[in-house]
Image: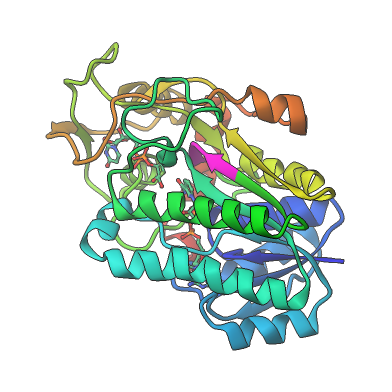
Amino acid sequence: MTILVTGGAGFIGSHTVVQLVKAGHAVVVFDNLCNGTAEALRRIERLTGKSVPLVEGDVRDRTALDALFRSYQVTAVIHFAGLKAVGESVRQPLAYYDNNVNGTLVLCQAMQAAGVRKLVFSSSATVYGSDAPVPYVETLPRGRTSNPYGTSKAMVEQLLTDLQVAEPGWSVVLLRYFNPIGAHPSGVIGEDPRGLPNNLMPFISQVAVGRLPELAIFGDDYPTDDGTCVRDYLHVLDLADGHVQALGQLVAPGLHIYNLGTGLGVSVLDMVRSFERVTGRSIPYRVAPRRDGDLAAFWADATKAQRELGWQASRGLDEMIADTWRWQSQNPQGYQD
Ligand code: NAD
Ligand code: UFG
């Protein structure tokens, strides 16, 4: 009775592994380490007292997956493995469709052959597209995506929907994440992007720790209260708990879609000011032009997850910031420290 976590050496996957182990699940991680690190797994052992096996491999490698399914009695798969940088996806669309779409296809083929038909997939709020009204609710259709990353998530959602219709024995949960930030409160694991961070929170925390000189705020002329973009930030541990609770929905066959967010909008400037207040660090910033593809404001209607999974984000913005800062200040160079 083992949960296979693909991409479990990455940011969200590593936090989910901790919560799975805490909930009593046996876990095996499968990761090619292109954006994750074995050090995260060693630190998880420190945190939980349990050693979680890491099988190094690529989800596009059918032979490696077949071997894994022969070695472990896998009951369900949580599939995080994939590429996630929006800008890079515009420059390298083939890499994104190969990793995210083909990777999921090969994984499903290997699951089918092994008789494992329970899957939780990391989707994204980005599938609602650019014209959806806020808050986003699951009954909205998928919208027009504006980059290959978002399109790859929408394509995988469609692939899994078609599979579940054709083979009704499958149990599939599509989790549409909003903006995960934060870190484990121990400061032992956290987000460790390679190169210049794309996302707001790791950028701010690297400015705070002195790795970067200043934050560029991408646009202050949006139709929002302070002119900067508004997002729904949620604590990565709340998101991890959402996965543990989603496993309960895999008991019966079917396909379920849930937004995982707080339902609260926070602007870029709110985030900078809150970070300064919580940490006592100053965050120098300048206003830069808008970033291509950014939407002005979106947040979740997360009532379905509350109703059906009993899940609700419980950690507030100050806690997300304090936990991010504990991780970043204790590990200024991330897992290299
Ligand atoms: P991450 O890059 O930290 O983790 C992804 C992990 O998958 C990494 O450890 C990487 O080494 C591994 N991986 C990538 N391609 C692989 C492949 N072909 N085979 C095996 N392993 C592979 O990213 P994350 O933030 O933890 O995101 C996890 C998932 O959640 C991704 O699918 C991402 O698209 C999705 N998601 C993330 C966010 C976010 O803001 N972080 C938002 C919405 C959805
Ligand atoms: N921002 C800045 N400066 C930065 C980085 C970000 O001003 O250096 C702004 C962005 O313009 C945006 C906000 O901060 O207004 C949040 O940006 P992020 O890059 O942190 O997050 P996004 O909302 O753009 O995207 C994230 C994930 C996607 C996912 C999406 C919705 O990166 O994978 O949330 O879930 F699809």
Q: Can you give x and y, in whole percent of width and height, for residue 278 in the image?
A: 47, 26
Relative to 280, 296 lies left or right: left
The answer to whether residue 71 is above or below residue 179 is below
Residue 209 is situated, as x and y percent measured from the top left of the image, at 37, 46
Which residue is found at the position 50% from the left and 20% from the top? 264
Viewer-proximal residue among 332 and 9: 9
Residue at x-position 29% and y-position 11%? 225
Q: Pick whichever, 102 or 242, lies toward us.
A: 102
Q: Which residue is drawn at 49% across and 36% down?
A: 178
Magenta stretch holds residue 152: no
Q: Main secondary structure of the magenta part?
A: strand
Q: Residue furthest left?
A: 289
Q: Which residue is most to the front?
A: 166
Task: Give residue 139's position: percent from left, percent from top.
Answer: 55, 27
Which range is magenta?
175-182
As for residue 178 lying within the magenta part, the answer is yes
Q: Position of residue 138 (x, y in %)?
A: 56, 30
Q: In which quarter of the image is the N terminus?
A: bottom right
Closer to the camera, 84 or 321?
A: 84
Q: Determine whether 117 is above or below 110 in the image.
A: above
**Residue 98 appears in view:** yes
The residue lying toward the viewer, choosing from 319 and 31, is: 31
Q: In the picture provided, is 295 more to the left or to the right than 185? A: left
